[in-house]
Amino acid sequence: MFDIAMIETILLTLRLAAVTTFVLLVVGIPLAWWLARSKAWGKEFVAVLVSLPIVLPPTVLGFYLLIAMGPDGPLTALIGRSLPFTFEGLVVGSTLYSLPFVVNPIRNAFESMGERHWEAAATLRANPLDAFFTVALPLAMPGILTGAILGFAHTMGEFGVVLMIGGSIPGETKVLSIAIFDFVESLEWGKAHILAGAMLALSFAVIFAMRLVETRFKSDLR
Amino acid sequence: MIEVRFSGQQGSFEIDAEFNAPSKGVIALFGPSGSGKTTVLRCVAGLTRLSRGRLVIDGDVWQDERVFVPVHRRALGYVFQEASLFPHLSVRANLEFGQKRTKGGERTIGFDDVVDLLGIELLFDRPTANLSGGERQRVAIGRALLSQPRLLLMDEPLSALDRMGREEILPYLERLHRRLSIPVLYVSHDIGEIERLADSLILMDRGRVRAAGPIADLLVDPALPLARLSEPAAVLDGVVREYDPDYGLAKVDVPGGTLLVAGELGPTGTVRRLRIGASDVSLSRKAVKDTTILNALPVRIDAVAPVGDAQVSVRLRLGTDEAGALLLSRVSRLSWNKLKFQTGDSVIAQIKAVALART
């Protein structure tokens, strides 16, 4: 049923989603912590920037990213190489695109935790870094899991940003949604059906898993 | 010695609190709600930082103009109103949380001792969510003790509990007080708790310290609002001399006199805290014969202050010298005037009831 090219596409998509989710957590958890705890004046401004991809058409985000990553773009100048039409470029784009879906639930989890446990940890001789890893992170775990799963799922399904900055290079940037689009364009309905069906099943499984994990964690922490 | 001085703006009201307290026993911070006692406690912990602060514990400066030791480096234990156990950790891991973060040399309070002292061994395998309020608070106290504090801070540890939970915890607090030498700063607005537990008292009002001193002195000071509470009382620590099993009465020596107290209060030499309500103490010029009242002791009138229109609050000193223990009596102003009592008079105090302040 699946040919080699399709499997390559599915694996690439999963790899992109996994790498992006990892980057999202590494970037998103400290960012969410800062947003939850800081009293800095510019904090809500940053929060709005993070949330922009929710309302922004993906093509707009992709367009700006393309410019930033272009030969004369600031990102190119910063890292010294051009990212469009590469896997790394997709990771950067997907990370920005999915950031709000990861940061917001984690921020909520940190905020709903309140001061009490944080203060208790300090009086029990835990320094802030220690308390972050041994108290704040474990208590925010349901939010972190929700964020990770949403980030993963959202990256799997993205299309607009990928189209703008990734194109359709098999094994490098040709992800599921692009492949489905290509199949439909070339009237290969059967293949489009297979991939679309696979996507549907996978998405269902992801959301279902998320519900299970959440219920489990909530009952543990109550 | 614990030297405390904090001042600054906290929300809408001003704190300017200063007191010294001995670094032993239970030091109660007492006052109406909004008097700033919890803020002072949080300042001592380093959880709240006011514009000016000074805190010295036995000569070690934890805070002054140049020094601010962060919370996690202050050797203190903090028991919050709500137990605040970590829900993601087992009871045992909660207890070990602070202990694990201390250095070997600091560990003078052993795990098994604390578990035994607080009776929490059977709780180890239960999820923290399934503990009762009293059980949680016991674990929280144990957790704080195991972090090897030089000072234990307790912020109304009983106020979130129902009556049963309170009665469950109080004996443990009394045991803690007897067995450990760590000073405790204890915030409460319940005078009953304080009569049972405290050795010294810091009386707070609107962000300031109104009075500070040994509890036995402050409770009977007619000038302080404590003597105008609805059921004022004196507490005094007495030493059991002997027990008369025929009548079930113990003879207890207190400074300046001896009291007969119902019940077997322990072997000779046991120290027991007694509570004598002000309305249980009446005064007469001469010893009254043929009365059922067991305790009639010579006292001197030490100070007096009116309470409303009808009553006066009288501080009495037991015996004939200045070393005598202090009692409080509340009598009607009419009798006071009719009998022409005056400060300095030697009179007889008839004590209708003596209760044990600690069980």
Image: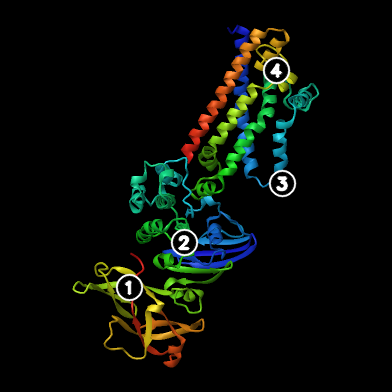
Work out whether residue B70 can be spotted: yes
Which amino acid is tagged 3? Trp
Q: Considering the numbered disc 3 on the image, is that residue within a helix, a strand or a loop? A: loop
Do callouts 3 and 2 point to residues on the same chain? no
Q: Residue drawn at (61%, 25%), measured in percent from left and top? A: A153
Residue wearing tag 1: B238
Q: Position of residue A122 (x, y in %)?
A: 52, 48
Which amino acid is tagged 1? Gly
**Viewer-proximal residue among A211 and A151:** A211
Do callouts 4 and 2 point to residues on the same chain? no
Residue wearing tag 4: A86
**Viewer-proximal residue among A197 and A175:** A197
Q: CA distance from mark 3 to mark 4?
A: 37 Å
Do callouts 1 and 4 point to residues on the same chain? no
Task: Please give the chain letter of the residue carrying mark 3.
Answer: A
Q: Is residue B31 above or below residue A154?
A: below
Residue pushed farthest left? B246
Question: Which circle marks residue A41 in the picture?
Answer: 3
